[in-house]
Image (tube, rainbow, N blue to C red):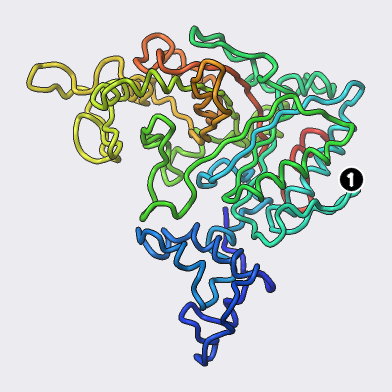
Amino acid sequence: MSKKKDAPTGRGTADATRRDGSGPDGGGPGKTGEVSRRRLIGTAGAAGAAGLVLGAAGGAGGYAATRDDEPAALTTVGSTEAMFHGKHQAGITTPLQARGHLVAFDLAAGAGRKEAAALMRRWSAVAKALMAGEQAESGRGHDTGVALDAGPSSLTVTFGFGRTFFTRTGLSDRRPAALDPLPAFSSDQLDAKRSDGDLWVQIGADDALVAFHALRALQKEAGSAARVRWQMNGFNRTPGATDRPMTARNLMGQVDGTNNPKPAESDFDERIFVPSGGSSADSWMAGGSYAVVRRIRMLLDDWEELTVKRQEQIIGRRKADGAPLSGGSETTAMDLDKAGPDGKLLIAGNAHARISSPEKNGGAAMLRRPFSYHDGISDDGTPDAGLLFICWQADPFKGFIPVQRKLDRGDALSPFIRHEASGLFAVPGGAAAGEYVGQRLLEA
């Protein structure tokens, strides 16, 4: 759930001057001359929302930077606020954000349930403040000021627990069966140092500084209770960069996420969130979900050597618009039985879209919510880039695992990707007012 946050005073002058230069009462233009720092900040933000306001007008942002009239005080991108409290944690059904950080922590030697509860209490307080666009003052030091002048920018902070967390906190009897280890897959080349972890945090925001600010604040707040095990940085298209809302593309250039379950579907909650009324051991997970996290490297040099037609055959969808090769638009249901004039299936038997479709997996579904990543150029000249794959489901043994097993056995895309890190985390439901995330587990 999110809302548009009212523009705070001091972040611009939209209340004093309209875009045509007139004052709030329709009077004369505001002061002209040297572009002030406040105006530059506001204009830079406004350029990010240009797609929302101006459509596809190229160069509008550059023009606005030298106009005499004042920009909006806080743009749509900056003012959108996700709610910390709620039935579910934010960052699961929240629309894709432009920037993301994934970070796993291990509890320090000797730290147990008491220290974990104190940490989750501190982390929740920091997340609540930052998601509201406020500073993160705490006993660990003053706010770094990294995100001063910015609004909440759709910041979400999502917390999860790994399998080892329960052993370290003496809560093994409350570890859900759904956290059993993922099976090995033939395409796995996993780096143990970048996999798993006691605690997992997903940070997303539509501004890079806001996202980094949250990452830094949470790292500081961990103090001596936990240390970083691994950390990954991701990105997506910035809201407003297209002339209309569109499904995101991955670094292969493919539209990615078309077949995602939709919240409006009658069985969405059943597939994605853990229901209430489960066993007493699992009751703390009511309203929560399970996140499978995979760092998937894309072998882009090999992929880009293929013709667009061959890429489309491997995926089973048109590259230009994401429509299935069986015809229609992006949202048209795939006709998996449709053949071409030569009698061959239009969507090949090993096409990625066919093998991963719910129709071919007994209705298995997961909510995919990834970030792309780029970690530089390897020594051999190939880009270390790909997908930080994150999927959400009520039970990974009914969502990710059966689908990945089928992909592992014959997906045409497999030669062009490599799974390099993996993790599975129990993400509890959202905190009620006055609670911290995980309280129902740690204080039961």
Q: Quarter-wise, where is residue 443 in the image?
A: top right
- Where's residue 332, x and y in %? 26, 38
Give 149 or 184, whichever is nearer the viewer: 149
Q: Which residue is depicted at the point 77% across and 23% down?
A: 165
Q: Amino acid at mark 1?
A: Arg
Asked whether residue 182 is in view, the answer is yes
Q: Is residue 156 rendered to the left or right of residue 265?
A: right
Residue 309 in the image: above or below residue 333: above
Which secondary structure, mark 1?
Answer: loop
Q: How many marks?
A: 1
Q: With 387 as the anchor, is 214 left or right in this view?
A: right
Work out whether residue 19 or residue 327 is closer to the camera in this orientation and state it.
19
The residue under the point 63% across, 50% down is 155
| Residue occupied by mark 1 | 140
From this view, report whether residue 288 is shown above or below residue 2: above
- Residue 108 appears at what percent x and percent y? 87, 25
| Residue situated in front as seen by the camera: 251 or 314 | 251
- In the picture as drawn, the residue positioned furthest to the left comes out as 341
**x and y percentages locating residue 199 in the rendered image:** 74, 29
Q: Is residue 379 left or right of residue 441?
A: left
Residue 393 visible here: no
Q: Which residue is rendered at x = 83% and y = 44% of the image? A: 122
Place of residue 119 in the rendered image (x, y in percent of width and height, measured from the top left)? 84, 37
On screen, 203 above or below 196? below
Which image quarter is the C terminus in? top right
Tell me the quarter of the picture where residue 420 sits: top right
Q: Residues within 10 Å of mark 1 (few under 14, many from 20)?
A: few
Quarter assignment of residue 219: top right
The structure residue drawn at horizontal position 57% and vertical position 36%, both measured from the top left corner, is: 234
